Image (cartoon, helix red, strand yellow):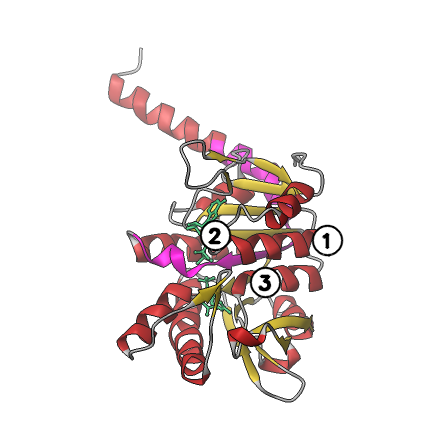
Amino acid sequence: MLPPSLTDRTKLAQEKARVLREALPWITRWRGRTVVVKWGGNVATDGGPDEATAAFAADIALMRSVGVDVVVVHGGGPQISELGGKLGLEPTFVDGQRVTDEATLDVVQLVLLGQVNPWLVGLVSAAGAPASGVSGTDAGLVTARPADARLGRVGDVASVDPTLLRSLLADGAVPVVATLGRAADGAVYNINADRVAGAIATALDADKLIYLTNVSGLYEHFGTEHSTLLSVVSADRLRRMLADGTLEAGMVPKIGGVVDALDGGVPQAHLLDGRIEHALLLEVFTDEGIGTMVTPRGEEPSP
Ligand SMILES: Nc1ncnc2c1ncn2[C@@H]1O[C@H](COP(=O)(O)OP(=O)(O)O)[C@@H](O)[C@H]1O
Ligand SMILES: CC(=O)N[C@@H](CCC(=O)OP(=O)(O)O)C(=O)O
């Protein structure tokens, strides 16, 4: 009989082999496919910020290295509120969208283009993938149109031209997109990152759209004692949730982005807790169903 320590080591090695075997069909399935991953600023706030985002960057680099065309779209809402607060700007939101006056727009640009984007580009690069930071205002990537006038310089996505992203992907790079947009008259607008992620996934005919946030997924009866995590849900059910007003705060634009993407032909979207290290890897390369999966009719695909 094997000594106990060797038995344990053998069991651990066999477990590693099992994980690798489990990953193979998923790696084969996702090679050459396009996956859009939206990193929410909340991933880097409450608790252990850098570990979770460093693990996220490592997962992105791994996806790239096995041949997935991966695009990162990032937010930075809490980081914008933090710097704005230091500068005396009180954050105000309407249905999850930041009311953006001219001074706030300056802060949005400073934080997204000067802090969050280069930080994520640095982490993905350090993890071994050639990341390339771009703004939605570059090369006509995101054309904005003014949103609700009460929101000031907030835009909706009018259109996405994926040419720049396609050429970066063809070069083997990982585009990391900051979600500003430019209107036809050249003016820059602040656009909610969840909506941009959905529009970019649609424009790229992505095979999967993943949102990383600070909850385990989408809950029914959120914030009540009856709250339950929805593991698989249909786009129709999300439409009903949007219409009946049961979603609050940041979930409104996120679910809006998911519904837009599914309506635009993206076959599946996921909401995951990005504070769990390697949540992305678990979702893409294992049989583990974590978080909430959204498909057109609420059915679960297999590899
Ligand atoms: N039904 C719901 N299920 C889960 N979270 C919800 C729900 N309704 C509202 N939320 C809120 O949405 C938040 C995530 O959105 P948001 O703050 O915009 O994150 P991010 O920065 O990742 O975009 C959660 O922290 C949660 O408080
Ligand atoms: C119009 C609008 O609300 N824009 C967002 C853009 C950043 C974002 O969406 O960040 P998260 O994904 O981290 O929430 C904002 O100013 O907060």
Residue 266 higher or lower than 7, as above or below: below
Tell me the quarter of the picture where residue 303 sits. Answer: top right
Task: Kindly identify the amino acid type of the residue bearing the numbered disc 3.
Answer: Arg
Q: Nearer the viewer, residue 120 or 32?
A: 120
Whether disc 2's CB lies below 8 Å from ligand 1 is answered: yes
Task: Kindly identify the amino acid type of the residue bearing the numbered disc 1.
Answer: Asp
- Per the image, label 1 sits on a secondary structure element best described as helix
The residue that disc 3 covers is: 195
> Label 1 to label 2, Cα distance in Å?
21 Å
Task: Kindly identify the amino acid type of the residue bearing the numbered disc 2.
Answer: Leu
Q: How many marks?
A: 3
Start-end of magenta stretch: 19-46
Which is in the foreground here, disc 1 or disc 2?
1
216 to the left or right of 185: left
Tell me residue 88's x, y (percent): 29, 78
Q: Quick check: marks 1 and 2 in contact, CB under 8 Å?
A: no
- Per the image, label 2 sits on a secondary structure element best described as strand
The residue that disc 1 covers is: 263
| Residue at x 42% of width, y 65% of height | 77
